[in-house]
């Protein structure tokens, strides 16, 4: 993990996975799925919106739906005296 990514994660950014389901341009009755991942900031998800705006502008395939899954934020470990390291 690069320093910039670690800093983003400590600032609340988390892994966001988007499944974009779209109509195939040459076969509009068929749907295709595309998976895309990036670090993004909830609840606005600026990187996801930038990607989807680019898709709508530059890609011929019309989006049917987008499903979003996000990971946990990276938080500092808590050390309990005489016990294991706990993550929250």
Image (cartoon, helix red, strand yellow):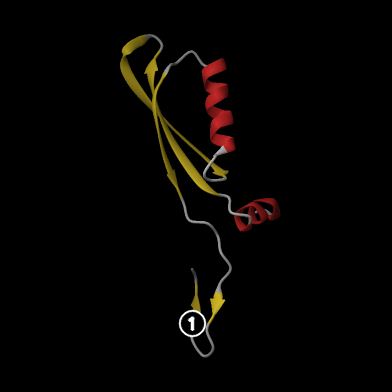
Q: Secondary structure at mark 1?
A: loop
Q: Is residue 34 above or below residue 16?
A: above
Seen at 33% across and 21% down, the residue is 31
**Residue sticking out furthest to the top:** 26
Front residue (pair 76, 60) = 76
Residue 7, position in %: x, y?
67, 55
Viewed as shown, does residue 76 lie left or right of 66? right
Where is mark 1, residue-wise?
84
- Res 40 quadrant in image: top right
Q: Is residue 73 above or below residue 64?
A: below
Viewed as shown, does residue 41 lie left or right of 18? right
Residue 9, position in %: x, y?
60, 54
Seen at 59% across and 36% down, the residue is 46
**Residue sticking out furthest to the front:** 43
Q: Quadrant of the N terminus?
A: bottom right
- Res 64 quadrant in image: top left
**Residue sticking out furthest to the left:** 29
**Residue sticking out furthest to the right:** 3
Seen at 52% across and 84% down, the residue is 80
Residue 24, position in %: x, y?
38, 15
Residue density around tag 1, few if under 14, some if 14–19, many if 20 or more, within 10 Å: few
């Amino acid at each position: 993990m690069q320093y910039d990514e670690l800093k983003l994660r400590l600032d609340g950014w988390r892994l966001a996975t988007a499944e974009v389901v779209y109509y195939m341009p040459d076969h509009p009755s068929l749907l295709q799925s595309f998976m895309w991942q990036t670090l993004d900031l909830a609840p606005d998800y600026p990187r996801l919106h930038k990607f989807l705006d680019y898709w709508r502008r530059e890609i011929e395939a019309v989006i049917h739906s987008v499903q979003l899954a996000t990971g946990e934020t990276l938080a500092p470990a808590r050390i309990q005296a005489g016990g294991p390291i706990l993550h929250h």
